[in-house]
Amino acid sequence: MKVHVERDRCIGAGLCVMSAPTVFDQGDDDGLVILLNDSPSEAEADNLRKVAQHICPSKAILITED
């Protein structure tokens, strides 16, 4: 699994950070998503799919499967 973010789509809601703080953060200056880990562990995979598909309101998080 690879995680990608489209910062230009992000609205800074911060739901990704609350749901997966080891993978996402928010920029101090603009509040937009920052990707901390683009290759998370398999243990985090189901949660990250949920974040990308249902939690992120702007659909700025994209998941590709290996």
Image (cartoon, rainbow, N blue to C red):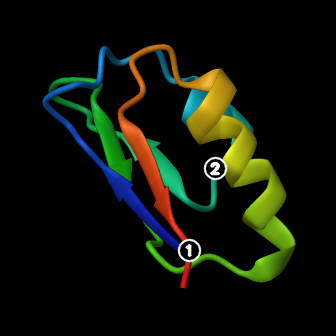
* Image spot of residue 61 (x, y percent): 43, 42
Rendered residue at 50%/58% (across/down): 63
Rendered residue at 50%/23% (across/down): 14
Give neighbour class at mark 1: few <14, some 14-19, many 20+ (Cα, 10 Å).
Answer: few
Decide if residue 18 is on the left or right side of residue 52: right
Name the secondary structure under disc 2: loop
When the figure is inspected, residue 11 is found, relative to residue 9, above or below; the finding is: above
Rendered residue at 27%/37% (across/down): 27
| Amino acid identity at mark 1 | Glu
Q: Which residue is mark 1?
A: 65
Rendered residue at 27%/30% (across/down): 32
Q: State yes or no: discs 2 and 1 in contact (Cβ < 8 Å).
A: no
Question: For this rendering, which residue is in front, 7 or 24?
Answer: 7
Q: Earlier in the sequence, mark 2 or mark 1?
A: 2
Res 22 label? none
Locate residue 54: give its quadrant: top right
Q: CA distance from mark 2 to mark 1?
A: 21 Å
Decide if residue 22 is on the left or right side of residue 12: right
Name the secondary structure under disc 1: loop
Q: Which residue is mark 2?
A: 21
Question: For this rendering, which residue is in front, 10 or 63?
Answer: 63
* Image spot of residue 20 (x, y percent): 68, 48
